[in-house]
Amino acid sequence: MSRLPITKTPKVYVGGAFIRSESSRVYPIATAAGGFFANIPQCTRKDVRNAVEASAKAGPGWAKRTAYNRGQILYRLGEMLEARAAEMTEALLVGAAASPRRRAAAGAEVGATIDRLIHYAGWADKYEQLLGNVNPVAAPYFNFTVTEPMGVVGVLAPETPALLGLVSLVAPAIVSGNTVVALASGKFPYPAILLGEMLATSDLPGGVVNLLTGFRKEIVPTFATHTHLRAVVGVADAGERRTLQLGAAASVKRTRLRHSDERIDWNSDGAQGLEAIRDTLEFKTTWHPIGA
Amino acid sequence: MNAGQSASFRRLFDQVGPVDAVGIEERAAKFTTRSIKKASKLWGLRTAVSMVDLTTLEGKDTPGKVASLCQKAVRPHDDAEIPPVAAVCVYPAMVKHARRALGADAKVRIASVATAFPAGQTRLSTRLSEVHAAVADGADEIDMVINRGAFLAGEFSEVQDEIVAVREACGRAALKVILEVSELETYDNIRAASFLAMEVLRDGDFIKTSTGKTSLNATLGNNQVMLEAIRDFFLNTGRAIAMKPAGGIRTAKQALQFLVAVKETLGDAWLNNRRYRFGASSLLNDLLRQIEKEKTGAYQAPYYFTEAAESY
């Protein structure tokens, strides 16, 4: 018996819930064969605002968790992705013709993404030992430098690799207790939609990671000027960098941006590690008298 | 409900008219669909600031906290175009501290929740002496709670007599009558209680939704029931009673929706702080944030504003 096709309404994951854009706008994406696949939410600056509110609400609770627990949750996210690796591979093929070579590359990207999550899960309770310090002083007191998460971090994911690029930017930010508002790839948004569904089942508290889809030119200016975003990390072209740097100067936020025309090897060891975690940390130096 | 009780309710409902609950909900839902942007939004936000009764009603209130609340009330933000709020709302014991902080002829008025707020379950003489003391300490407005027990028992004249007694005790101070809508249970009861109160109030006195101390507070629905009661009462008697929703209004967006309800139900004559107030603490900071957003175009972080009143 033939069944009616059950088509999916992709929704973005914001504040622990699956929502449509407040604007109700959508844009279509195509299947690998070129037919209609689904309508993707075209988020607006108001969706950014709502996501930042959700993110700020989740922040203190997330930062207060033990580093060990944050590591466990990142590891579980890796597990969720592992179990649905085949589905995610298909998601990466949405929007482009699927040759056997592309299929293999998509499979490899999912594998690399899972490994990246496990990599940062491991860092969760170890980066502090490397970045924090007991500073030498010449009097009877201790002088410590410790790290603190910055708060709400904006992530601008590269167009490709849609999944690995996004996760490589989100994971180092949340591992230290930041919360994230991320704009997914505009051309290949579906993996981010699916990632949202995995985040929802990974014990990650709602609001810690908020994934938006939509057009960069509509959302980047709000990322630049929103004063509640403490940092923006990701990939941007020359025009966007200018917008972001002007906005960041006015709202005193940190930017860690890479050129979109730079050839970044997201698979390499250089695309992960301590430096990426440090990008969204603040350092606090404090003293304490000895023996008191 | 026994026979005598239901008969007295029936008589009252016949007198003031029933409420179409579904109609009210539908009407209230429509208020949330108005698109208010740019200059009209800015006007609405500023008007809302001038209508705020900045409130602190905590067991842990201290004279110092009340003093800083008063400062915030007079000058909510460094932008000089932002008006002061309408009033500060404090417990009777804090009235003299508020008066000291604000000075004798302040633009910001002092409201005090007398009459054994929030339950109101003490003897009338105790409640009245509380009102006398608050007025003597310098309160410009008294927020009283009605006797819900008497109301639900159908003892309507007792409810009114107590309001009259408190009104007399107020002297020149304005009176706000808190119906505590969450304990009245139905829209019919809210309308009936509104009329009971308004019949014994003076021009410029208020009816107020709630204490903010129960689970359900001001909603667009019960605000609308009370606004329509005020409208009907005004058309019948010519006496203009003011309105104060309180509790649960935390965002600028909500405040604008309430103002839409006022505009579309009572008209421009009620769009000022002599006729309409918001009882709120955290609302003010969100209004300031949105005003700043309208001016600068950038969304603002909450920590750019002085400490929100709810954390006092």
Image: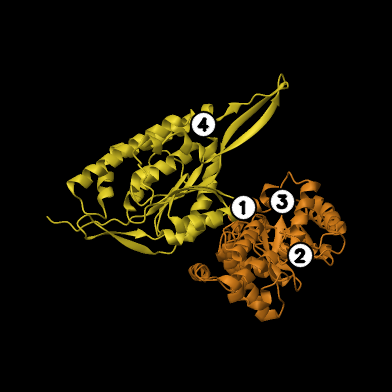
Q: Is residue B39 above or below residue A22?
A: below
Mark 1 or mark 2, which is nearer to you?
Answer: 1
Tag 1 subunit? B
Q: Position of residue A234 (x, y in %)?
A: 44, 48
Give the CA distance from mark 2 to mark 3: 18 Å
Callout 4 and callout 1 share a chain: no
CB-based contact (under 8 Å), mark 4 and mark 1: no
Give the CA distance from mark 3 to mark 1: 22 Å
Q: Quadrant of residue A122?
A: top left
Q: Name the residue tied to disc 2.
A: B175
Callout 2 and callout 3 share a chain: yes
Looking at the rendered structure, the kind of residue marked 3 is Leu
Graded by Cα atoms within 10 Å as few (under 14), some (14 to 19) or many (20 or more), the crowding at tag 3 reads: many
CB-based contact (under 8 Å), mark 2 and mark 4: no
Give the CA distance from mark 2 to mark 4: 52 Å
Q: Position of residue B290 (x, y in %)?
A: 60, 62
Give the CA distance from mark 1 to mark 2: 34 Å
Graded by Cα atoms within 10 Å as few (under 14), some (14 to 19) or many (20 or more), the crowding at tag 2 reads: many
Q: Name the residue tied to disc 3.
A: B57
Q: Name the residue tied to disc 1.
A: B302
Tag 3 subunit? B
Q: Name the residue tied to disc 4.
A: A66
Q: Colour of chain A?
A: yellow
Q: Which chain is orange?
A: B
Looking at the rendered structure, the kind of residue marked 1 is Pro
Residue B180 seen anywhere in this rendered image of the structure: no
SS class, disc 2 = strand
SS class, disc 1 = helix
Q: Earlier in the sequence, mark 3 or mark 1?
A: 3
Callout 3 and callout 1 share a chain: yes
Q: Position of residue B118 (x, y in %)?
A: 70, 52
